[in-house]
Amino acid sequence: MRDVAIIGIGQIPVGEHWDTSIRHLALGAAMNALQDANVAQVDAMYVGNMLSGHISGQEHLGAVVADFLGMAGVEALKVEAACASGAAALRVGLMAVASGMSDIVMVVGVEKMTDTSGQDTTAALAMAADAEYEISQGVSFVALNALLMRRYMHEYGWAREDFANFAVNAHANAVHNPHAMFPKAITAAAYNRAAIIADPVGLLDASPVCDGAAAVILAPLDVARSLSPAPVRVRASAIATDPIAMHDRPDPLALHAARLSSQRAYAAADIQAGDVDFFELHDAFTIMSALSLEAAGFAERGQGVRLALDGEIARDGRIPITTLGGLKARGHPVGATGIYQVVEAVLQLRGLAGAAQIPNARLGMTQNIGGSGATIITHILEAL
Amino acid sequence: MTEKIALDWRLRGQRYRLEGEECPHCGYAIFPPRDICPECHQPAKEPFQLSGRGEVYSYSELRHAPTGFEEYAPYTVALIKLEEGPMVTAQLTDIVPERVEIGMPVEMVTRRLRAQGDEGTLVYGYKFRPRLALA
Ligand SMILES: [Zn+2]
């Protein structure tokens, strides 16, 4: 196996792109990444996406993106793993380069979510759960997270207000991200006042429905330095699964796939959780931030919320998270999210995160969650 | 939402009667039917009738319903830990929302889950209500 590096990154602003179709969202990010890597052609491309068939009536995205990039002929595939589709596509790209089957590979994450009504988008997102035994009962994705949050509060004695700083921190960091959907600070008071959408989940616990695309270019590490002035090494890529339905997991609050995926990534990188300088976690809901911090080894069970309360998730805290806004404030265009996380981690490791920069960031971790936790993918990146 | 008559028909045993399986190797109660035991990973196809009794593991009142369920909002969904072990996701019915709490004893009833459009078939299935007589 060959070591792999990221030699280029690209993204477009996350938001409601009414005048842009899914293919042109992908092209925007892809063109930026190709320019950043200073390459004109790739050997293969993998497109991470969840909902194009349902929302845009368009499957077969590998061929669509390759065609509209003017690269018809190239190897191209769509990769799907619900909200973890972006990281899943990255993993396929990494396997292609590490194995020697391809040299220069592009990975694009893209999602167009605003072409249907809110209810239809809600129903589409629910496809990440168990269609026969969860969705058939009328639960939404928000409701699944509400069930987790209620149980967590019950077991560990937290109040709803204790989760506020996850949202406050994400928004404070997004202020410094020109690609964020909500680059505006919010207060804990605003969090507490926000409308409840599925008790106890409120509007400011949840990440927004939006459009977006992000891309990276991969190359073998041994040639990366000659191609890029600031390559970032991929130290680990690890994926783990759990039962598709939340109710079939022996302990739904354990986020077992996150634990497995993190441990595999630490082992592959030969590091421990404490070595990580920042953690781009999957804060689709505030409860997911708490559970992710615990499963990845940054807090004891039931104490993930404590890290937020104590300010340890801020830029100068023990484990900075969502450093450029996270899913909450940068936005969560589902199939693109895993690549946005990696693009932002690369910016931190290149020292180009501006006012959001983590001082001396050397090791960054990203974690992308599919569904309520049935697929969880972790990547560890290192500045060179 | 499109009509899925064959799909709903195929699931009638589970949906109407909470029919599961019991593992002949380790005795694990399985719901929904998987044919492979999640505990010992051996073949497990013995039919098993769950009692329908359990308690609320968690719950949420849902204000924004997905397509197909709009007319029923707000309604309360829950995770129910069944007496025999398995957990299921289902709606609560016949409740006073303020009185629902974690640990509340509940029992299964068969109710209408939704209508598939104005002229489509009605989909029935399990919901759970507060247990009337505590056995
Ligand atoms: Zn068994």
Image (tube, rainbow, N blue to C red):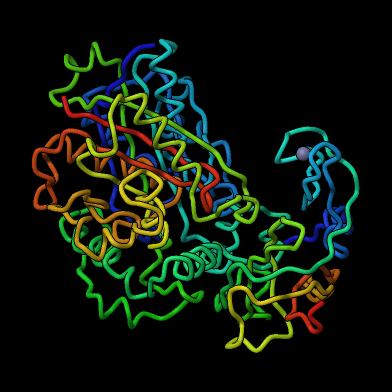
Q: In this view, does A66 lie to the left or right of A267?
A: right
Which residue is located at x 34 percent, y 58 percent? A303
Rendering coords of residue B24 (x, y %): 86, 39
Q: Quadrant of the C terminus of chain B?
A: bottom right
Which residue is located at x 68 percent, y 66 percent? B80
With respect to residue A304, does A159 lie above or below? below
Which one is in front, A241 or B103? B103
Which one is in front, A182 or A212? A182
Rendering coords of residue A120 (x, y %): 58, 64
Which one is in front, A155 or A178? A155
Rendering coords of residue B119 (x, y %): 84, 74
Which residue is located at x 63 percent, y 72 percent? B77
Rendering coords of residue B132 (x, y %): 79, 84
- Residue B74's image quarter? bottom right
The reply to whether residue A117 is in sight is no
The reply to whether residue B90 is in sight is yes
- Residue A110's image quarter? top left
